[in-house]
Image (cartoon, rainbow, N blue to C red):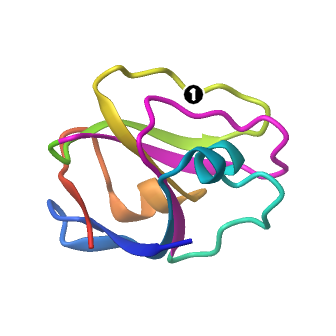
Amino acid sequence: MKQVKVVNQTRGLALAKEAGLADNTWTRLRGLLGRPPLQPGQGLVIKPSTGIHTWFMSYPMDAVYVAKDGEVLACLEDMAPFRFGPVRRQCHLVVELPAGTIRHTGTAVGDRIALQ
């Protein structure tokens, strides 16, 4: 799987220095299912995506919904297993991160995210 860096340009911080890019049907469908919990500095970018779920996962995670222009549309903190996140039609991609990353970085709606 291709790796990218996810940067919050507004705050000048890396959300994930190593994030997998799930950009085809199979990798988007699998997501983090059956994978160990993300460690600090890791993530998964699901592109395209208008929403996510945590069904069959065994750990919580953070999720950042991002529009095509890079604007953060929603931040879901500590999303518990067996939940559905909201569907956002304007969303272009979702970044899945270790639980606590949003709080630790101060990422908020309106921030700008870039993939490098």
- Can you give x and y, in whole percent of width and height, for residue 19 in the image? 49, 70
Location of the C terminus (image quadrant): bottom left
Task: Please indicate whether residue 34 sits to the left or right of residue 102 in the image.
Answer: right
Q: Residue furthest front?
A: 25
Residue ID at (39%, 22%): 88
Q: Which residue is depicted at the point 14% across and 43% down?
A: 69
Q: Residues within 10 Å of mark 1 (few under 14, many from 20)?
A: some
Looking at the picture, tell me which residue is in the foreground, 108 or 7. 7
Q: Is 57 drawn above or below residue 4 in the view shown?
A: above
* Residue designated by label 1: 85
Up the image or down, 29 lies above or below 95; here it is above
Q: Position of residue 62 (x, y in %)?
A: 55, 49
Q: Secondary structure at mark 1?
A: loop
Of the 4 image quadrants, the one containing the N terminus is bottom right
At a point 43% along the width and 54% down the height, the residue shown is 102
Determine whether, in the image, residue 61 is placed left or right of residue 72: right
**Is residue 46 a member of the stretch shown in magenta?**
yes
Indicate whether residue 101 is drawn in magenta. Answer: no
Residue 58 x %, y % = 85, 50
Residue type at the position of mark 1 = Gly
- Residue 56's spot in the image, x, y percent? 85, 40
The magenta stretch spans which residues?
Answer: 42-68
Residue at x 71% of width, y 28% of height: 83
Task: Identify the image quadrant of residue 110.
Answer: top left
Q: How many marks?
A: 1
Q: Is residue 83 left or right of residue 23?
A: right
**Along the viewing direction, whichever of 60 and 33 lies nearer the viewer:** 33
